[in-house]
Amino acid sequence: MRFAFMVDPQEGLAYIPMLELAQAAEQAGFEAFVRSDHWLSLTGDWNAPASDAWTTLAGLARETTRIRLGTMVSPITFRLPIALAKVVATVDEMSGGRVDVGVGAGWYDPEHERFGIPYPPMGERFEMLEEQLQILIGLWTQPRFGFEGRHYRLRDAACEPKPVQQPHPRIIVGGYGKPKLVQIAARFADELNLDNLAPEACREVFGRLDEKCVEFGRDPACVRHSVMLAWDGAPALATPAEQRRMLSAYLPAGVQRIVLDAWPGPANPDAIEVLGREVLAAFV
């Protein structure tokens, strides 16, 4: 089992304490440190400071050495495909090839409304997600790339420099396991992350994912199974033995990585150290 630690900086987490958490997670043995990509608090505190995800990841890339970095997840409504392709490739270079890019269809209505971000119906956003993934892969892997879709059109587009990771950074698709999301993950993703689902629900979704991979001619082993769990409040305060039991329940469900989300957080470096020593070490 692999583990990532997640924070939600749109709730007022500034860069320096975020860096301290990332460095603590690196020392504690987490595979990755990821952050949400929101520009507005999810708790209704509209004045809470909310830093930009990829700008802060660029900073973390220069102040960590081993831990992987990424978003969980970047809404496709926020950026044009070329903007996301460029920033991911840039941070991948700055980190020496340690970037994972999480993408999703977007969901937070107030954020879009307050900032004037177009927010099409869900079906249309899934179409945009599917097109963006094709474009990202094309821009990262081909010298020149053209695309004609319903939402995006590119002509003889180049994206240089390419990412350090080849053929491209790991793509993570995240959500609640809706059939369309599973289909998109089976076609384009390297990992499907499910949001706070119970073990049996994870087993059912990942079974559908494996079947879809076969339909698309992909080896199911190419798409990692992961789940995000809220890990603040009661879960984080449970004893190490209780935490180990909670996490162990996901092993029979085929979960290969767990993202511990310090929602609404943040945690503190000492708690992360104990988590690594008393909990994560049991899964090595």
Image (cartoon, helix red, strand yellow):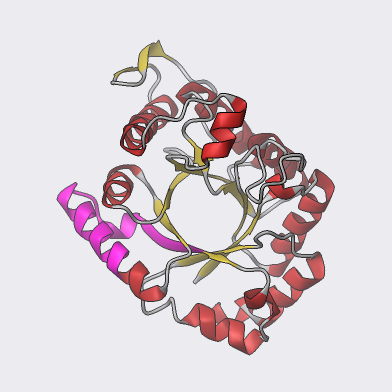
* Magenta run includes residue 141: no
* Magenta run includes residue 227: yes
Q: Of residues 26 and 16, which is closer to you in this image?
A: 16
Furthest residue in direction left, as rendered = 215
Residue 187 picture location, percent across and down: 28, 44
Q: Of residues 137 and 264, which is closer to you in this image?
A: 264
> How many marks on residues?
0
As displayed, is residue 17 above or below residue 229?
above
* Residue at the spot 33% in from the left edge and 35% down from the top edge: 130
In this rendering, would 245 be left or right of 22?
left
Residue 221, quarter of the rendered image: bottom left
* Residue 22 seen in this snapshot: yes
Residue 85 picture location, percent across and down: 50, 28
* Residue 89 seen in this snapshot: no
Residue 146, quarter of the rendered image: top left
- Residue extent of the magenta highlight: 204-228
* Residue at the spot 81% in from the left edge and 56% down from the top edge: 20
Residue 183 picture location, percent across and down: 26, 47
In this rendering, would 28 be left or right of 167?
right
Residue 139 picture location, percent across and down: 42, 25
